[in-house]
Amino acid sequence: LRGINVFFTPHFTSAIAAFGIVFTTYACIVASEIWFVYRKFFVEEAKRLKGATGLDGIRGLIYNILTLGAYDISKEALETDHKVAVYLAAIGVPVAAFLHGYAGFIFGSVKANALWMTPLMPVIFILSAVVSGIALCMLTYIVILEFSLIKASFGKGRSENIKQQVRAAQMETIRLTKKYLLIFLVAAISLELLDLIFRGYTAVKSWDILRSVIYERDFNLIFVMQYGFGNLLPFILLMLPRISVRRTVVALVLVLFGVFMMRWNVVIGGQSFSLTFSGFMHYSLPIIPHNIETVKEGLIGALAVIATPYIILVGLNFIIPVIPHFEEDHSLPPAHPDPPQHPTTWTPS
């Protein structure tokens, strides 16, 4: 229960308490970006629902509040919104890097743990965060788009033409994003292997302990599950020609699994031994909880953390058009293998 104190008492005298400042700053930047991007939509909806009653009246009140009194949606005002959003995105990049490297900084500054104490730990965490972020964004995009297409197939005005055009745009997006994923995946793997090789080459006093952990006790977790199934296999799947949605989904799930195993091997593996080499400790993830602690620290707590962003996403969709709703547009040309010149129209669901 003390974890919330980092938000109420943030300061830079403590590495952990500094997280409150970094997280709050990044949250404000992201919220501001969303506001500038959707301000025109807020104003249009506030005007459209003006004088409405019932549920629409409540939504109109929410949109009026979200406009923050800025009702100017002229061309000049919208151009200013776009410029500010770009500046905020540029500022958000280093702040996001600092935020995601923060956990690595905490681990890397622990002198008593030989596995954690390395100056590369923050950079490794940043790259793994970029890899998992791209993979999760791609996976979420594919799932939402497939769900929207299935939903549209049962609605009015459905046709194969619109489905094929959306599929073409989807594959183009996957091909483009896949390139960035491969770049950062190679960078993350290279940096982790570089750290491992450097430790073995220098062979400091703690290497005897680390060698027994890396090459003996946790060999399967590190080299088979993390590097094999989580890095090498998805890399091969993404490099093969004629990429498909199904193969991409499998590769993305494996990438996320690899990042999870990297964090598991760092956090859990780093706590399983001591510098005195008195033996190893064994950790079992609580599957069936028997008290409040095993609920928070077990499988249920982990699933709750994973589900929370998607619950928030669905909730935001009632206010902000996040999930697309496709409509038939007869002005569109027939589907072809290249990306459509006129994108499919969509409205908030």
Image (cartoon, helix red, strand yellow):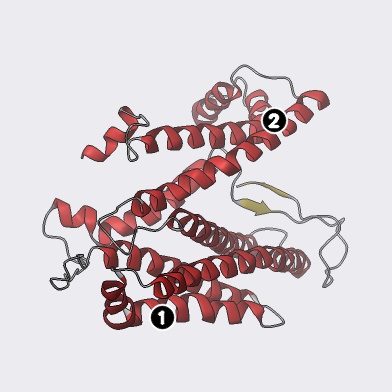
Q: Nearer the viewer, mark 1 or mark 2?
A: 1
Query: Where does the image place residue 233, in percent across and percent down from the top left?
Result: 53, 81
The amino acid type, in three-letter code, at marker 2 is Val
> Which mark is drawn over residue 207?
none
Q: SS for tag 2?
A: helix
Outermost top residue: 69
Q: How many marks?
A: 2
Query: Where does the image place residue 197, in percent across and percent down from the top left?
Result: 46, 74
Query: Where does the image place residue 73, in percent across and percent down from the top left?
Result: 75, 24
Residue at image location 23% in from the left, 63% down from the top: 271
Can you tell which quarter of the image residue 214 is in? bottom left
Query: Which residue is under mark 1?
Result: 223
- If you read the primary sequence from the N terminus, does the residue marked by circle 1 or circle 2 appear first? 2
The amino acid type, in three-letter code, at marker 1 is Phe
Q: Marks 1 and 2, how far apart in space?
A: 45 Å
217 or 134, nearer to the observer: 217
Other-residue count near label 2 (Cα within 10 Å), few / some / many at <14 / 14–19 / ≥20: some
Residue at image location 59% in from the left, 20% down from the top: 68
Query: Is disc 1 in contact with disc 2, using a CB cutoff of under 8 Å?
Result: no
Q: Establish if 266 lies above or below 28.
A: below
Query: Which residue is under mark 2?
Result: 84
Can you tell which quarter of the image residue 287 is in? bottom left
Q: SS for tag 1?
A: helix
Can you tell which quarter of the image residue 66 is in? top right
On the rendered structure, is 178 left or right of 118? right
